[in-house]
Structures are given as structure tokens and as C-alpha cells.
Amino acid sequence: MSLGEIGPNAPSLGSTLRAGIAGRCPACHRGKLYSGYLAVAPKCHVCGLDYAFADSGDGPAVFVILITGFVVTGLALIAEVFYTPPYWLHAALWGPLAILLPLVLLRSFKGVLIALQFRHKAEEGKLASE
């Protein structure tokens, strides 16, 4: 099997994405991935998969920042063009949304990236020995 190739026993992409969004184990899709809000558990309590490989880095945060910025800015512009609300109403609407939306999305995005990392057997890059 070549690098990046997925084996015949790999779970489907859809089930991998659903497991990540739900915060479930990327192997069995039943155990919990998290022990806290964003803290990855040491291992799956159902199948025993060691989560030491799980390092999503800053990837989820970047995606969430970009999506949140697009949604909040787009909605604020639409509201301004069609309704022209006062500035205090803009602040009251878009400030809380800009805080809550990343909190809602971050856990799911991190779970999806960890599940995809497991599915594709992604590892840290290594230099060839000379």
C-alpha cells in the first residue's frame, strides 16, 4: 500500500466525518474522543485505541476562524444593507455570535481532523537517514 492510500478495511468517509463531529473514537465510532471540552482522552474506553497519535495542531482553529469571520461579516453586511440598524445593535448581535460560533464549531472540527488523521494513517514527517 502506498503512502496516503486507504486500506480496504478503512471506515467510509461519511462515518469517519460523523464520528469526528460527534466526538467519538475514530476506530470504533463508539467510545469518547474527549475527556473534557477540547482535551483528548488518553485512550478509547471501548476499543482501547491509544490516542497518542491525535495531534490536530492549529488546523481546527484556522478553519473555525475563517468560517466565523465569513459568517459574522456576511450577516453584518446583509443587516446593514437591508435594515441599517444602529451601531449598538450591530455590537449586540455580532459580538456574541463571534464568541459563541467558534466555541460551538471548534470541538467538531478538531474531532473531524483527528478522525481523518487516523483514517489516513497520517504521521509526523521524518527525514530519511543519511
Image (cartoon, rainbow, N blue to C red):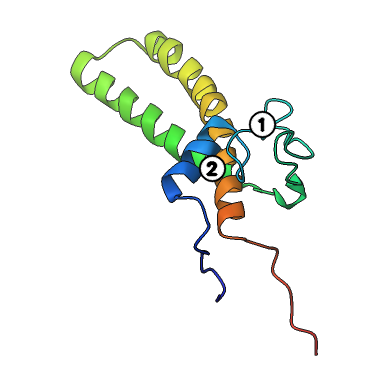
* Quadrant in which the N terminus is drawn: bottom right
Instruction: Please give the label number shown on residue 32.
Output: 1
Q: Residues within 10 Å of mark 1 (few under 14, many from 20)?
A: some
Outermost residue on the left side: it is 82
Q: Position of residue 117 (x, y in %)?
A: 60, 54
Badge 1 element: loop
Residue found at x 63% / y 47%? 58
**Residue type indicated by callout 2:** Val
Distance in Å between CA atoms under marks 2 and 1: 13 Å
Badge 2 element: helix
How many numbered callouts?
A: 2
62 left or right, relative to 41: left
Q: Residues within 10 Å of mark 2 (few under 14, many from 20)?
A: many
Task: Determine whether 40 is above or below 113 in the image.
Answer: above
Instruction: Please give the label number shown on residue 112.
Output: 2
Q: Quadrant of residue 14?
A: top left
Task: Determine whether 99 is above or below 49 in the image.
Answer: above
Q: Position of residue 76 (x, y in %)?
A: 33, 23
